[in-house]
Amino acid sequence: MGERAVSRFIDLSYTFEDKMLAFPGDSEPRLYQSEYIADVGYNKFHLETGLHIGTHMDAPFHIIEGGKFISDLPVDALTGRGHLIDAVGQSPVSAEALDGRSLAKGDVVVVMTGHSKTFRTPEFYEGYPEISEEFAEKVVEAGVAIIGLDTPSPDREPYAVHKILLGNGVIIIENLTNLEALVGIDDFRVYAFPPKLRCEASLVRVVAEVH
């Protein structure tokens, strides 16, 4: 028998920290230690946060009345063959950015805009590039399962792109990082498993497996 190919894993998620900068209008998160070994014999932390901060996933219920919660999402829809789309310098990201891509049902499209370099600054939430409606429609037509972004949102009010994607069952992951590590890699798989919460969004650890 031949040797099994060894995979390596690339973390595409931000570290969640106390008082990290939140989307304008959202409450500041708190992650703090509430118990200490010296006092009670163990360490314990407490988390108070909205769910649209750091690397997180939007389920359809976020913007679609009657849509699925995070807990409703089937496990096999939370992983898929990855496609890195280099959209640095584009805003909005046009459908032409997908030209030449053989997208298939269940795939994961990851859009690199370079905007992650502004994370933890007000500019991250104020000046992010958007995704065009035509791009979103093309993703839906291909049967893509997830679209991941290094921005806090694919659009702004009235959130037409959110509605196109989530209304057709395409899950949105926002605030990815380290996408530059995928440049030049054609064969990778994305895994994005959130806690099984009955709500509209969740923090999520996103990892790319490179073959």
Image (cartoon, grey):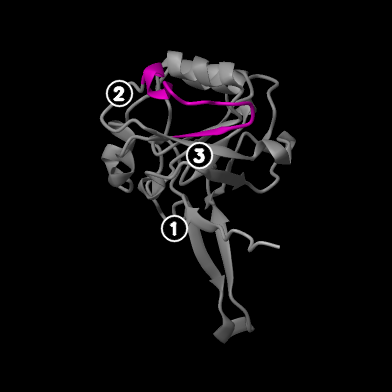
Compared with residue 52, is residue 89 higher up or lower down, i.e. above or below?
Answer: above
- Alpha carbon separation for disc pair 2 and 1: 29 Å
Circle 3 Cα neighbour tier, 10 Å, few/some/many (<14 / 14–19 / ≥20):
many
Residue 138 in view (yes/no): yes
Can residue 163 be seen in this snapshot? no
Q: Earlier in the sequence, mark 2 or mark 1?
A: 1
Frontmost residue, 134 versus 42: 134
Q: Tag 1's secondary structure?
A: loop
Which numbered disc, 2 or 1, marks the residue closer to the eye?
A: 2
Q: Position of residue 17 (x, y in %)?
A: 44, 58
Vertical comparison of 18 with 50: above or below? below
Q: Secondary structure at mark 2?
A: loop
> Magenta residues?
94-110
Question: What separation in Å lies between label 3 and label 1 (alpha carbons)?
Answer: 14 Å
Query: Residue flagged by tag 1: what amino acid is it?
Result: Glu
Look at mark 2 in the image and give the residue it sits on.
Answer: 91
Q: Nearer the viewer, residue 139 or 54?
A: 139
Please give left or right for residue 120 compared with residue 141 in the image. Answer: left
Q: Amino acid at mark 2?
A: Ser
Residue hosting label 3 = 52
Q: Circle 1 is placed at which residue position?
A: 17
